[in-house]
Image (cartoon, rainbow, N blue to C red):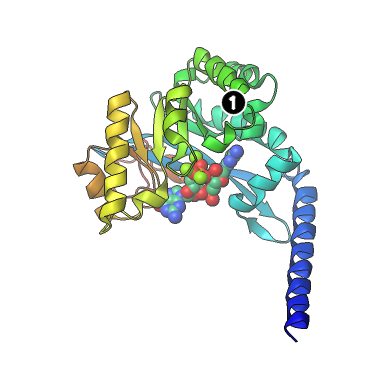
Amino acid sequence: RAKSEGRGTYRFFEARMGAQVRERGLLEHDMRHAVARGEMHLVYQPQTDVRDGSVLGFEVLLRWQHPQRGAVPPGLFIPIAEESGAILQIGEWVLREACREAAGWPNPLTIAVNVSGLQLHAPHFAQLVHEVLFQTGLKPERLEIEITETALIRDPARAQSTLRQLKALGLRIAMDDFGTGYSSLSNLRTYPFDRIKIDGSFIRAVDGNEQAAAIVRSVLGLGRGLGLPVLAEGVETEAELGFLVSEHCDAAQGYLMGRPAAIGVFTAHTHGPEPDRDGQALVA
Ligand code: C2E
Ligand code: MG
Ligand code: MG
Ligand code: MG
């Protein structure tokens, strides 16, 4: 009896895994033509100065509107794009589009672009970035590349040399999702990061959770000690922002200050009379 139940359970999982593999295959196939067919677009989320709420720049986030499935979450399709290699072409498109867009913004505003491990390890990645900056006319100091720790592990020596080349171009490099990786501390020391982005999971726990608060405080102390500005991701409530203000965090990003949106949502108000502290009219 138990044995047949076990077998049933096994079949159930086997069938489910089969469905998941097929699902991945379908997405991987459809993704190949997604950019060419105009199914991908970019949204932008403001990054603000914690002291006065002013907008420092935007992070660009990729969106895929599948013709049949509707919006496919990046958490689902980015890993598939990395495994299939499609991220190389898609990522180049993201970089070029975002830099072209940002080149038209008022001068000090920055653009932060997520770069995957495969992109970072591709030959001539720094050369590609150099070309895109040249072609779009964006000043390198206005571009920030966001890298997670997992993007470094494929070939640490190669990652290191590419990051140094990128630094030599004059752009900034942020460690994304800080605190969720395996060896955040040694990676901060080994690689030439300019900024720490504390993962949203810590920020969303600070309210009423003394452990999370202690972790965020210590990351802020770490940033100060290393001379690296810290940005808090995933800020959703006034209480979280209040905590960051009182702990002298440098910058913040999250639904409270603005959800990722088409860039027009932000620039539509550019010529309005008053920048709106808690609204969308943030581009001065
Ligand atoms: P990430 O780079 O850490 O981006 C932050 C994620 O948190 C985004 O999810 C953003 O929409 C979400 N977020 C922002 N504020 C809040 C908040 O207040 N609360 C909550 N709960 N979430 C918030 P998204 O857009 O789904 O992207 C997920 C991940 O996909 C990104 O994490 C990034 O790793 C990856 N990704 C997105 N666009 C690109 C891209 O163009 N290239 C690459 N390589 N990866 C990308
Ligand atoms: Mg990011
Ligand atoms: Mg992040
Ligand atoms: Mg993330």
Residue 102 position within the rendered picture, expressed as x and y whole percent measured from the top left:
50, 29
Q: Residues within 10 Å of mark 1 (few under 14, many from 20)?
A: some
Q: Residue furthest top?
A: 168
Q: Looking at the figure, which quarter contains the N terminus?
A: bottom right
Q: Going by the image, does 209 lie left or right of 45?
A: left
Q: Can residue 179 be seen by looking at this rendering?
A: yes
209 or 277, which lies in front?
A: 209
Give the answer, above or below, for where 132 lies relative to 14: above
Residue 183 position within the rendered picture, expressed as x and y whole percent measured from the top left:
47, 36
Q: Can residue 276 be seen by looking at this rendering?
A: no
Q: Residue furthest left?
A: 246
Give the answer, above or below, for where 47 lies relative to 241: above
120 or 95, which lies in front?
A: 120
**x 65%, y 50%: residue:** 64
**x 33%, y 29%: residue:** 229
Give the answer, above or below, for where 167 lies relative to 180: above
**x 29%, y 52%: residue:** 211
Q: Residue furthest bottom?
A: 1
219 or 108, which lies in front?
A: 219
Question: Total number of numbered labels?
Answer: 1
**x 76%, y 49%: residue:** 28
19 or 180, which lies in front?
A: 180
The image quadrant of residue 94 is top right
The image quadrant of residue 6 is bottom right
Q: Looking at the figure, which quarter contains the C terminus?
A: top left
To which residue does mark 1 refer?
156
Residue 166 position within the rendered picture, expressed as x and y whole percent measured from the top left:
54, 18
Residue 19 position within the rendered picture, expressed as x and y whole percent measured from the top left:
77, 64
Helix, strand or loop under label 1: helix
Q: Amino acid at mark 1?
A: Pro
